[in-house]
Image (cartoon, grey):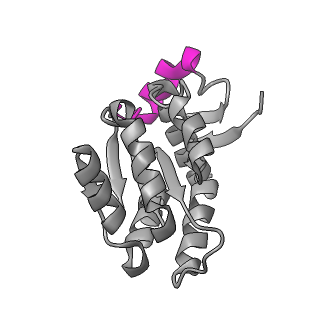
Amino acid sequence: MVNYSFPSPVGTITDRAADRSYGMCVASALHWPQMTPPHVALIAHDGCKDDLTDWVLYNRGTLAQCELIATGTTGDRIARATGLPVRRLLSGPIGGDAQVGAMLAEQNLDHLVFFWDPLTTQPHDVDVKALLRLAVLHNIPTACNRASADFLISSPLLFDSGHLGRRKILARLKSVG
């Protein structure tokens, strides 16, 4: 078990203190966020949009229980193909990737599914790199291809409110410390 230790208004919080068995104590002290369905961002480069749409169709039942956010064209395709509600942002190259990055930094996303094309140079490569850096920095589970997306969506932690809340609390404590 990794031991995280962050200063907080209620003393030092370790991973054990943030564990579910101590969750109520930590939650009341730090105002545990109200649990909502997981917020999942969906992004795909042009050469990967069909793959992501197929993946969403295959996992439609599970993703119907999530709040889906997607960049422009990807969101349009997914909404049309699946009938699922998708909050659409700007297209990636004109600010959509930056919008997702801001949501990551503000802890407003729980998972990122980003099918990117490693063989094609993108005009907004800097935004792509920044987006992936923010996902890692803020400890957001990220899938970059169908195999990793399958692992992410089949994880029992996908809907585990204790896990999602714990990650958010630790992220807040880390940013304060």
Decide if residue 11 is on the left or right side of residue 103. right
- Which image quarter: residue 27? top left
Q: Is residue 169 above or below residue 117?
A: above
**Residue depicted at 65% across the width and 68% down the height:** 118
Instruction: State yes or no: residue 23 in magenta.
Output: yes
Question: Residue 33, position in %: x, y?
Answer: 38, 35
Instruction: State yes or no: residue 3 in magenta.
Output: no
**Is 90 or 24 nearer to us in this picture?**
90
Q: Is residue 33 visible?
A: yes
Q: Is residue 100 above or below residue 121?
A: above
Q: Quadrant of the N terminus?
A: top right
Question: Residue 3, position in %: x, y?
Answer: 76, 33
Q: Is residue 108 visible?
A: no
For the record, the magenta segment spans 20-35
Decide if residue 166 is on the left or right side of residue 33. right
**Is 127 or 162 nearer to us in this picture?**
127
**Is 113 or 61 nearer to us in this picture?**
61
**Residue depicted at 49% across the width and 45% down the height:** 111
- The residue lying furthest to the top in this view is 21
Q: Is residue 96 above or below residue 105?
A: below
**Residue depicted at 31% across the width and 53% down the height:** 78
Decide if residue 19 is on the left or right side of residue 98. right
The secondary structure making up most of the magenta span is helix
Q: Is residue 135 above or below residue 147?
A: below
Question: Residue 28, position in %: x, y?
Answer: 42, 26
Question: Residue 85, position in %: x, y?
Answer: 23, 46
- The residue lying furthest to the bottom in this view is 123
- Which image quarter: residue 82? top left
